[in-house]
């Protein structure tokens, strides 16, 4: 009988190693690729590590498109890839999430041990991705690692962050549910109740909503996203986004200008694009923004 070889998944095909099932993956380029970064950034130092945080319940095949582009633009960079799931934002306690992030912390430590410059590009998508980034930086601080903060140089915030909103939160989580009618019939009422309960706990001050926590952390003057290593932050948004209101994004950007500095914060509107789909509408402009932001970060 002929042996059947199981198909490799999308991330394995792209050279990623699984650190935590369904959650954290790491890509390390071969030594032969070092020094061959795209001509678009040949005049500046490329990032050594890209921290890529996908939107809530993202499918690997969709995230892979962004991974491939990063590998083309920055072929010598490592990529630490995070997937976030509804349980992290609804009921899984922080201490459990921080424990699961240990392999990611080790990956960052290993990178910093080998790269004295420690140039990190952070690229997050939606509230789910911003939540992953927040948990990573807080787990890093709690671990007592050195340096005290993850040394991020450039931050790309795609379709985030929003202000806590019950209706939009329910919509966002439902979007990530399996497509089968039976499972959705079962899961949607549970989702509505869980988010309603979490919102009630937030209102009475017992527990903080993950979206509120993440939104504050991104502009926390004592946090890893607002340090002297951060040279550039770009907010990418669209008025056609039905998940994260553009007004929420711009309000957060205005706060960021006060804590990071006006010259470090940039907002970019994409016309006609939907949630985490701005690169689909105008990919050339989208990736040019990222490479230009990195050039400015590397030169400052």
Image: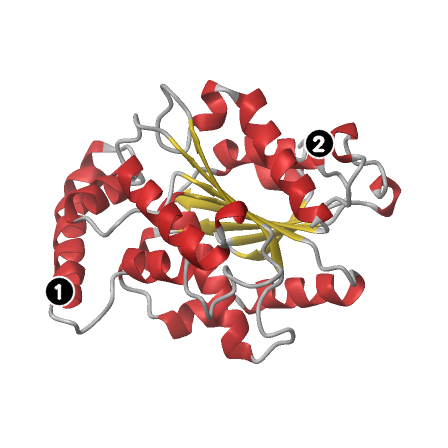
Residue 280, given in percent of the width and then of the height, sits at 47, 22
In this figure, which residue is indicated by the disc labeled 2? 72
Q: Dividing the picture into quarters, in which one does residue 283 lie?
A: top right
Q: In which quarter of the image is residue 56?
A: top left
Q: How many residues crowd mark 2 within 10 Å: few (<14), some (14–19), many (20+)? A: few
Would residue 299 be visible to someone looking at this image? Answer: yes
Q: Give the colour scheme shown.
A: secondary structure
Residue 137's place in the image compared with 183, above or below, is below
Position of residue 212 measured from the top left corner of the image (x, y, whole percent): 28, 59
Q: How far apart are marks 1 and 2 (CA)?
A: 46 Å
Mark 1 or mark 2: which comes first in sequence? Answer: 2
**Height in image: 207 above or below 258?**
below
Specify whether residue 8 is in view.
no
Residue 291 place in picture, x, y as percent: 65, 35
Q: Which residue is drawn at 59% across and 29% down?
A: 287
| Nearest-to-viewer mark from 1 and 2 | 1
Q: In this view, does 47 lie to the left or right of 259?
A: right
The percent coordinates of residue 68 (x first, y second) are 64, 32
Q: In which quarter of the image is the N terminus?
A: top right
Position of residue 228 relative to residue 1, above or below, is below
**In-front residue for pair 76/57:** 76
What label sits on residue 203 in the rendered view? 1
In this view, 203 is above or below 288: below
Q: Helix, strand or loop at disc 1? A: helix
**Quarter location, residue 273:** top left
């Amino acid at each position: 009988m002929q042996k059947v070889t199981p198909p490799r998944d999308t991330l394995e095909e792209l050279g990623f190693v699984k650190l935590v099932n369904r959650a954290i993956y790491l890509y390390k380029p071969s030594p032969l690729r070092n020094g061959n970064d795209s001509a678009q950034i040949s005049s500046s130092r490329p990032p050594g590590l890209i921290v890529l945080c996908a939107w809530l319940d993202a499918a690997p095949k969709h995230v892979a498109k962004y991974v491939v582009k990063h590998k083309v633009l920055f072929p010598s960079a490592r990529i630490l890839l995070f997937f976030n799931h509804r349980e992290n934002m609804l009921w899984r306690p922080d201490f459990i999430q921080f424990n699961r992030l240990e392999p990611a912390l080790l990956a960052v430590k290993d990178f910093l041990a080998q790269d004295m410059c420690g140039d990190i590009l952070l690229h997050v998508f939606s509230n789910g991705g911003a939540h992953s980034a927040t948990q990573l930086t807080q787990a890093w601080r709690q671990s007592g690692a050195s340096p005290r903060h993850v040394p991020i140089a450039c931050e790309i915030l795609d379709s985030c962050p929003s202000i806590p909103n019950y209706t939009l939160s329910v919509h966002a989580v439902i979007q990530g549910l399996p497509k089968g009618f039976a499972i959705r019939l079962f899961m949607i009422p549970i989702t509505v109740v869980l988010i309603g309960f979490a919102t009630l706990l937030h209102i009475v001050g017992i527990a903080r909503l993950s979206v509120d926590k993440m939104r504050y952390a991104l502009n926390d003057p004592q946090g890893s996203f607002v340090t002297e290593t951060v040279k550039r932050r770009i907010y990418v948004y669209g008025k056609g986004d039905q998940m994260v209101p553009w007004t929420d994004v711009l309000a957060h950007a205005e706060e960021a200008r006060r804590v990071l500095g006006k010259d470090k914060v940039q907002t970019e509107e994409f016309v006609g694009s939907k949630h985490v789909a701005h690169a689909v509408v105008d990919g050339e402009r989208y990736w040019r923004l990222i490479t230009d932001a990195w050039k400015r970060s590397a030169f400052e």
